[in-house]
Amino acid sequence: MDAILLQIMNGLDKGGAYALIALGLTLVFGTLGVVNFAHGALFMLGAFCAVAMNKFLSYETVVVDPTQLTPWGSPLEIRTPYVQALLGDWGKFLIDYSVPVSILLAIPVMLIISLIMERGLIRFFYKRPHADQILVTFGLAIILQEIVKQFFGANPIPQTAPSAVSGSLAITSAISYPYWRIVYFLFSLGVVAAVMAFLRFTTFGMVVRAGTQDRETVGLLGINIQRRFTIVFGLAGVVAGLAGLMYTPIVPPDYHMGMDFLVLSFVVVVVGGMGSLPGAVLAGFLLGILQSFASMNEVKSILPGIDQIIIYLVAVVILLVRPRGLMGRKGIMES
Amino acid sequence: MRNTKVRDVILLGCFAVAAVAAPLLAAPFGAGYPDLLVKFAIFGIFAVGFNILFGLTGYLSFGHAVFLGVGSYAAVWSFKLVSVNILPAVIGAILVSGLFALAIGYVSLRRSGIYFSILTLAFAQMCYNLAYSVLTPITNGETGLRVLRDDPRYLDSAVGVLGQSPSLFGLPMTGWTGYYVCAAVLVVAFAFSVAIFRSPFGMTLRAIKTNQNRMGYTGFNSRPYLLTAFVISGMYAGLAGSLMAATDPLAGAERMQWTASGEVVLMTILGGAGTLLGPVLGSGVIKYFENIFSAYNEAQLGTTLSFLPESIHDGVVKTLSLFVGEGWQLTLGLLFMVVVIFLPGGIMEGVMRVFRVKHTPPVKSLGDSAQRDIVGESVIEEMPADYGAHPAPEKALAEAKIGTTAQ
C-alpha cells in the first residue's frame, strides 16, 4: 500500500512538469495552429534562468584572514558572496531561495524570448503545413540549446532547493518523500489553475476562447485577435519556463533536457487531445504516475524495460483506439 | 515515352560517372579522400530512401534513423555470427529493417499529418530507449556493438575463411575499395529510386500527396501504397546502416536518436524533397560541411582569418568559433531554419530557377507541388495507356496538374 502511494506521489512532480509543458503546447496549437517543436527549448531556457540567477547571486569576495590558518598552514581565505556582504542576512536568504527568486528573472526573460520568437519566426508559418512548422521550430530548438551549451557547458548543473524545504517527508520508516516535490506539485497545480482561470474568467480569456472557435468572426468584430494570440504564445512560453525553473532542484538542468521533455510532452498532448487544456493536464499527471508505476521493481521484473516505453505505448494505443485523445473534441484531427 | 527513358538513362549514366570520378571531382574541395566519400555515399542512400517516402507521399517520418540503427545492428550481428562478407550482412540488414518498417509503418500509417510524425517519433524513442536499457544483450548498450576476434562466424569457419574485418569476397571495406563498393550500391539504389519515380506506383504516391481525400473519394485505398513506400524507404535506411557498419564495424544506439532522424530530413529538404538528385546533393553538402566545420577550431580560424585588420580580427574569430568545431550543431540548426524559411524547394529548385526549366512553380512550402522534377514533368503527360486497373489515379493526376498550375 505504501509502495503504491509512493509511486503515485513520485509520479505527481513529473506529471506536473509534463502537464505544464503540454498545457503550453496545446494552447499554442489551439490558438495559433502551430506545432511548436521549440517548446521544450523554452522549458530548458527557464531552467537555465535559475542557473544564471544562482551564478549571479553567488559571486564571491575573497578576503584573506592571516590570523586564522587552514589545516594546511596557509592563511584562511574567507569567501563571502557579494550579495551577503552587501545585504547581510537578507542576502543569505536570497541565496538560499535562489530557485524561487529566479522566477522574478524568468518571467520577463521568458516573455521577451517567446514574444520575439512568435513575432520573428512563428507568425510567418501560420499558413504553412505542419511539416514546415515542425522543421523550422526543430531548427530553432537546436540553435537555442547549442547557445545554452556554449554559455553553460554540456554538464548538468545541480541546483539546491531552499533549506527550509530541502528535507524529506517521512511517510513510513522506510519511505520518505522530498518536500520540494510536493512544492513542485502544488506549484504546477497553481499555475494550471491560474492559466485556466485567466482564460475562463477574464475578458481577455474570453476573447481568446472565442478566437479559437471562430477566428474570422472575432476579427470582424473589430478585435485584434492576432495580438491576443501572440500574448497567449508569450504566456505559454512563461509557463514552460517556470516549469523548467522549478524543476531544477529535482533534476539538474543540462542543455538537452528540453528535447527529452518535449517528445514526452507531445505524447502527452496527443493522449490528452490536441487543443484540449484539461486533457493535457489530466494526461500529464496520468502519464507521470503511470511512468512511475512502471518503474517499480515488481513491474519491471515481469515486463523488463516497460518503464522506458510505457508512455509511448499508451500514446500508440490511444492514437489507434481514440485518435482525438482523452478529452479532445469530436472531429478535430481525427484522421 | 522514349524521351523520358532516354533522359533517365542519361541521368543515370552521368550519376554513375560522377560516382566513379568522385575522388577527382571532390579533390579540389579537399574532400577527395575515401572516409568522407564513403559518408557521402551512405547518407546519399539513406536520403534517397527517405525521399521515396517524404518526397513522394509527403508523409514526414521523424523516426527514420531507427531503421538505420537496426540495419547497423543486424549487419554487425551478421559479421559476428555468419561471415565477414558484407553480402549476407547487407541482405540481412535490409530484411530486418524492412520487417521493422512493416511493423512501425502498419501502425503509424493509420494516421496522417502531424500524428504520423509523432507516432514515428514515439516509436523511434521507444527503440532508442530499449536499445540502451533492456536490449543491452543484443545492442551492447552505450559501448556499442563491435566485431570481436573470437566471434563464432559459423559460415566463415565452415569454409575456412579467416580475418575479422568486413570485406566483399576479399575486397576490404576500407579505403578506396570500400568507397567503390558503397558507390556501386548508391548507383543501384539511385537507379531503383528513378524506377520508382517513373512507375505507376510512384505516380500513385504523388497523387496521394497531392490530394489524399480525393483519392479516397474515388474509392482508392491509399494505405497499402503508403505502407509499401514506407517499407521500401525503411529498407533503404537499413541498407545504409549495414554499409555504415561494414565500413566502421561498430554499431551504437546514438544512430537512432531523433536528431539523427532530423538530419536525414534536413538532407532531403536541403537538396529538394521530391526530386531525384536533390537528396544525394543535400546529404553530400551536409556531410561535407559537417566535416569541414567540425574539424576547425578557434586557433585554426585565427590563422585563416589573419588577413583581417587587427581591430576586428579577435571579435570575428570569437563569433565564428561559435559555429565551428563543437558548435557544428549550431550551424546545422541555422541551416535548418534558413532552408525551411527561404528555400523550401531546396537546392534543386534554385538550380531549376536559374536554368529556367519550364513548369517550375515557385515552391511555397516543403514539397507542396508534386511535379517539380524535370523529367517527372514529361511522365505525367505520357502516362501509359494500359495503366487502367483503377480509374482513380488518372483522375487524381488530372487534379494534381490543376493543383500545380493554380498555385
Image: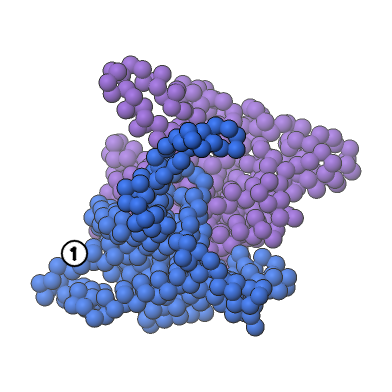
**Residue at the disc numbered 1:** A227
Residue nearest the viewer, comparing B116 with A150: A150
User: Which chain corresponds to the colour purple?
Assistant: B
Residue positioned 46% across, 28% down in the render? B297
Residue positioned 85% across, 36% down in the render? B161
Residue positioned 77% across, 32% down in the render? B170
Quadrant (top left, top right, bottom left, bottom right) of the N terminus of chain A: bottom right
Q: Is residue B376 left or right of residue B141?
A: left
Residue nearest the viewer, comparing B242 with B169: B242
Quadrant (top left, top right, bottom left, bottom right) of the C terminus of chain A: bottom left
Mark 1 belongs to which subunit?
A
Residue A78 percent coordinates (x, y): 46, 41
Residue A43 percent coordinates (x, y): 40, 59
Q: Is residue A287 left or right of residue B358?
A: right
Residue nearest the viewer, comparing B133 with A152: A152
Residue nearest the viewer, comparing B47 with B15: B47
Total residue callouts? 1
Residue A23 percent coordinates (x, y): 38, 70
What colouring style does the render use? Answer: by chain
Identity, as a three-letter code, of the amino acid under mark 1: Arg
Question: Most extreme residue toward the left, as rendered?
Answer: A222
Residue B258 percent coordinates (x, y): 52, 53
Q: Is residue B394 left or right of residue A322?
A: left
User: Which chain corresponds to the colour blue?
Assistant: A
- Residues packed near mark 1 inside 10 Å, few (<14), some (14 to 19) or many (20 plus): few
